Image (tube, grey):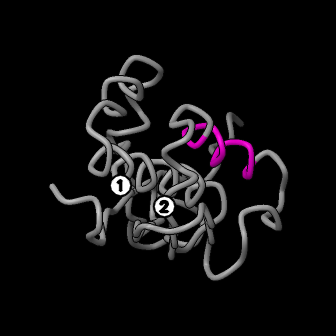
Amino acid sequence: MAKKEVIHCVGKRKKAIARATLRPGTGKIRINDKPLELLEPKYARLRIEEPLILAGDVVKNVDIDVKGGGIFGQVDAIRVAICRALARFERKLKNIFMEYDRCLLVSDPRRTEPHKPSRSTAGPRRKKQQSKR
């Protein structure tokens, strides 16, 4: 695989879908057109930076743009998308990510349960409270 090409990867979590685009560059990382340093809350930013720290110097040679929706669901989706793109760019990173945490490369398959009829705004399994007397 040539190191000059653009790599597209997708990460999913709950209803969030993050699409990462990795291209050769200077190490800029943008989430929805904002630099990673400006992302709030701080905990979300730290979770996204985790795979970047594991990747080491590889990140300094690429630019990563991520688009997607959600808040904390998006954070996990972003992590998966970034890790998949970095693993395709540099093959040895796949083993590093898998040894550290398998969830960095494998999306969580759990999805929210669809709401049921009648009381659908209260939740999928919500029932009317039963009185004993």
Where residue 38 sits, quadrant-wise, is bottom right
Residue type pointed to by label 1 = Ala
5 left or right of 67 in image: left
Near-viewer residue (123 or 111): 111
Tag 2 secondary structure:
strand
Coordinates of residue 62 in the picture (x, y in percent)? 48, 61
Q: Which range is magenta?
A: 44-52
Q: Is residue 99 visible in the rendered structure shown here?
A: yes
Residue type pointed to by label 2 = Val
Coordinates of residue 111 in the picture (x, y in percent)? 38, 53
Q: Which residue is mark 2?
A: 62
Q: Is residue 103 above or below residue 78?
A: above
Tag 1 secondary structure:
helix
Coordinates of residue 60 in the picture (x, y in percent)? 58, 53
In reply to whether residue 102 is colored magenta, the answer given is: no
Q: Residue furthest bottom?
A: 33
Which label's residue is closer to the chain start, 2 or 1?
Answer: 2
For residue 103, which numbered disc appears in the image?
Answer: none
Where residue 108 sits, quadrant-wise, is top left
Give the prevailing secondary structure in the magenta stretch: helix
Q: Is residue 27 above or below residue 53?
A: below
Residues at discs 2 and 1 in contact (Cβ within 8 Å): no
Near-viewer residue (130 or 58): 58
Query: Which of label 2 and label 1 is nearer to you?
Result: 2
In reply to whether residue 46 is colored magenta, the answer given is: yes
Q: For the image shown, how many numbered marks are present on the structure?
A: 2
* Mark 2 to mark 1 CA distance (whole Å): 10 Å
For residue 85, which numbered disc appears in the image?
Answer: 1
Q: Residue furthest top?
A: 99
